[in-house]
Image: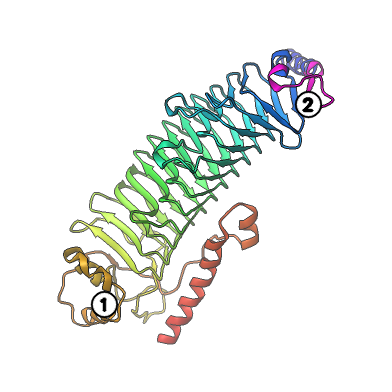
Amino acid sequence: MIATRLGIVLLFVHALAAATLVVGPGGRYSSAREAIAGAAAGDTIRVESGTYPGSLVLDKPLTLVGVGKPVIHGDEQGSVITVLADGCTVRGLILEHSGGMLVKEDSGVLLHSSGNHVEENELRDVLFGIYFFASSRNIVTGNVIHGRAWLGAGERGSGIHIYNSSENTISGNTISETRDGMYLQYASHSTIRGNHVSDVRYGLHYMYSDDNTFEDNSFSRNVAGAAIMYSRRITFRHNRFVHNRGVSSFGILFQEAENCVAEDNVFVDNAVGIFMEALRGTVFRRNLIAANDTALRIFSSATGNTFEANNFIDNLSPAEVIGRSTDTHWSGAQGGNYWSEYDGYDLNADGIGDVPFKIQNIFQHLEGDYPRIRIYLYSPASQALAAAEKAFPVLEGSREFDRHPLMKPVALAIPEPEKARQAGIYPLAISMAMLLIPAVVYRKGRER
């Protein structure tokens, strides 16, 4: 009890002793660098509106806060702000003109310490945006990061790069035109929530990073919305993977990953919705996979994965299997999946189709042997061939069956458009999700 009271007293005395140092017109200091040199641990440095040349190093616990979005103009070498002390805060600044050396982690903010807050800054003309180097328990929120669009993708750094770090929280950031939006390597127990990433290679990229969660993020116009590689136990919910298109583009890509959980996500208008190579023991539940060229691309190396209670709606092809077959489970505790092209019946009215659904596009099966016929993939002739094959099957085709297909779409936990917009979730995905399901149900009702 005595020790606790003493600790409270010391904190109170420290708070009374902490000073606020003002940089700018009317302030004591003309540069943030001078104020840092004159500050004591725990002080606040308030930077007034204006442009201040010179990169900064925080080597003691300080709060560096901007008023009116002042600009810290870096030296065009090294990082604009380097944080060496634990417990620092960097808020409300415009940071620009870092160096250009990838091997030296030249960044807008370079964290070499833990327990920091980086909040509501704008970073532009920086190689890496915010770089965590053996830096844990930080909170990075509300930042806008623009990469160097004039560089080739391989010459840029990531918007947020986390290396050998754990227990970080990344939320509400907007990232564009970097190499990867957020890159985690040897990074565990981190939470990534409510970020919006566009026009990058991989919106979110895990490498050798276990036990992480990402939710309520939006990934659009990227080569891949997310890539999970050599990582285990990644849980992701309520994310939007929208309009990720190109020759080899995906909503999400898995490679050598295992024991992940995907729930209530939206994969809309991607070249491939979900790409699975050497993915093991993963559950996909209550996701919307709609209006993609190919809903699923599954390699035979993907084993022990389960799809249950997902909505597959108006994809040009439901699945492409690379190899003879997979051991994918197409139903689980919540039943099978809803397929918009399923035309079976339900005589006992239990909501489950009485006829298994064969998961294939027969014309795409032929394309594997004759690639040039792709130009006819969605022509009337291809549709006629698909209908004829269904009536008089002569090709072996896919060995994948959903033996418990659902007759109606599954209700998904998709936020209302205004709430989604406030959370930074890409509104197009919400609109398409709300329109696609009723439209397909109406159409199938007319067909019956």
State whether residue 43 appears in this view: yes
How many numbered circles are shown? 2
Reply above or below: 309 against 379: above
Q: Position of residue 84 (x, y in %)?
A: 58, 19
Q: Badges 2 and 1: C-beta atoms under 8 Å apart?
A: no
Residue nearer the viewer, 260 or 267: 267
Q: Is residue 45 magenta?
A: no
Name the residue that disc number 2 marks.
24
Residue nearer the viewer, 263 or 248: 248
Q: Is residue 358 left or right of residue 152?
A: left
- Quick one: label 2, few (<14), some, or many (20+) residues within 10 Å? some
Estimate the spatial distance between the alpha carbons at disc 2 and disc 1, rounded to whole Å. 70 Å
Q: Position of residue 395 (x, y in %)?
A: 16, 72
Name the residue that disc number 1 marks.
382
Q: Is residue 17 magenta?
A: yes
Q: Looking at the image, which residue is at 55% across and 27% down?
A: 76
Residue nearer the viewer, 1 or 57: 57
**Which span is picked out in magenta?**
15-34
Locate residue 291: give its quadrant. bottom left
Q: Position of residue 19 (x, y in %)?
A: 79, 19
